[in-house]
Amino acid sequence: MDALTDEQLVVLIQQGNINAFNNLSQRWETSLYRFIRRMMGNSEDARDVCQEAWSKAYQNIGSLRDGSKFRAWIHYIALNLCRDRFRSLKSKAIHSSYEEGGLETMPEGGGKAAQWATTRHVEQTSLKTLLDEVLTELPNEQRTAIVLREYQGFTSEEIAEITGVPAATVRSRIFYGFKALRRLLNERGISPTLPA
Amino acid sequence: MKRHESVDPKIDRLVAALYGEMTDADRRDFDAQLKVDAALRTEWEELSGTRSLLADWEVEDRIPSFLVVEAGGRNRRASAAGWLEGFRDRFGSWFSVGGWVVAGAAAAVLLLALKGVELQKTDGGFQVNVGSRNRPVTRQTVDPLGTIPLQVSSNGDAGTSTAAYLTRDEFDKYSAAMLRMVSAYMNEYRGRRDQEIGAALRSLYGDINAKQSSQYADLLGKIDATRPADRIAHDFLRPMELGMSHADSLGPLLSPEDVEVGRNE
């Protein structure tokens, strides 16, 4: 069954073959989890979303007409679940900030104390941890475009199908995402340069 | 439905070039423009430099699996894995080296029980029964010396026929060998902190000792009756090698001729 294409496996699944679905999920579980983990920024939420994504995929695979697009389809499901989760977390954060004294009490841009903490932070954490932090600070659209292109290997056209925007817009989001990333890294004392 | 947005063509070309989403002809044009356009070159270098950092953004989490399991059906992959994990969680601490020995012994006992083998404690030690309880069981006594043709009937009687007799000397050697064997096992385990095995061996030894002691006089009488010429009472009752010997428990067995009743020195 490992030799079968996604399209062939989807046909088997639609005929009721559970093993075919397990084979397909085994094929893409690592890739999908890494995508969700990079989008959510933490393992706990990533595991929940991942589980839910596979569950939804299993429930709805009967509606997938083109089996060759399974990989893009499961990413589309996962992306929507990530968005739902962000919305839920955001509303919780706003609710929490009101309880703690209102939004106006939150420091804009971190302030001096935050900058000092950031400088120390750079000294103490690895680049990997730093990237984990700054990439989650990017706007969702930009992070989505960068993660799907850079790590998931989708083309701009495929990302356009997943996200529902033109491919040129995807490339624009990647460009501005990189700009923002560079600025965030500069703020933390890292200056990305072209490798020699 | 895709929305149409106006995107700066320069940005579009930069990203397309970055990810190789250009035709060869477009790429040649882009490279040519890079040589003459300093602003474009700066953007390109910044973009490429930032991208090069992203290789360090790794995810090292354990990847969760998702498996569909048919309830009560054929596909039991997930449930089997779950059972194994649950078993490991519950009994993980058993799976040390010692734990495997205990588990192996328990499995062997279980297997023997399933095969109809029964271990039964008797007043003289342990008896292994094979098959149905109602089926006649052949008893075989292990001969530790390897030379004495010893046959014992089911009630432990050495027999009275000339074909199955024991001399005192033979019986003495046999008993001594048996006790040496038990003694050796006890010495082996004495250094170990395994109280259960020690207690079991002490119990076994006690049972053997008690059984032999009780039958000793009877057997001697039978041996004497069969072969009076072989009677060598003083040699027979030499001290055993264990701390508590037959000699200690019974005292020296002397023939009536050697005993002087009423003499008090």
Image: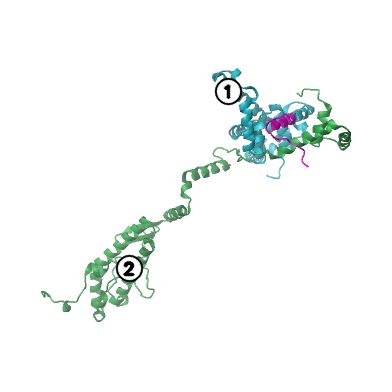
The picture's colour for chain B is green
Q: Which chain is cyan?
A: A
Q: Please provide percent x and percent y for residue A147.
A: 70, 33
User: Real-space Cα distance between discs 1 and 2?
Assistant: 79 Å
Q: Residue at x 37, y 68 (%)?
A: B142
Figure quadrant of residue A53? top right
Say which element carries label 2: helix
Q: Residue at x 57, y 21 (%)?
A: A97
Q: Nearer the viewer, residue A188 or B7?
A: A188
Q: Quadrant of the C terminus of chain A?
A: top right
The residues colored magenta run: A177-196
Residue under label 2, please give it: B179
Q: Look at discs 1 and 2 and give the one toward the viewer.
A: 1
The disc label shown at residue A92, or none: 1
Inspect this view and state whether residue B179 appears.
yes
Q: Please provide percent x and percent y for residue B227.
A: 26, 79
Figure quadrant of residue B16? top right
In the rendered view, does A103 fall on the left or right side of A172? left
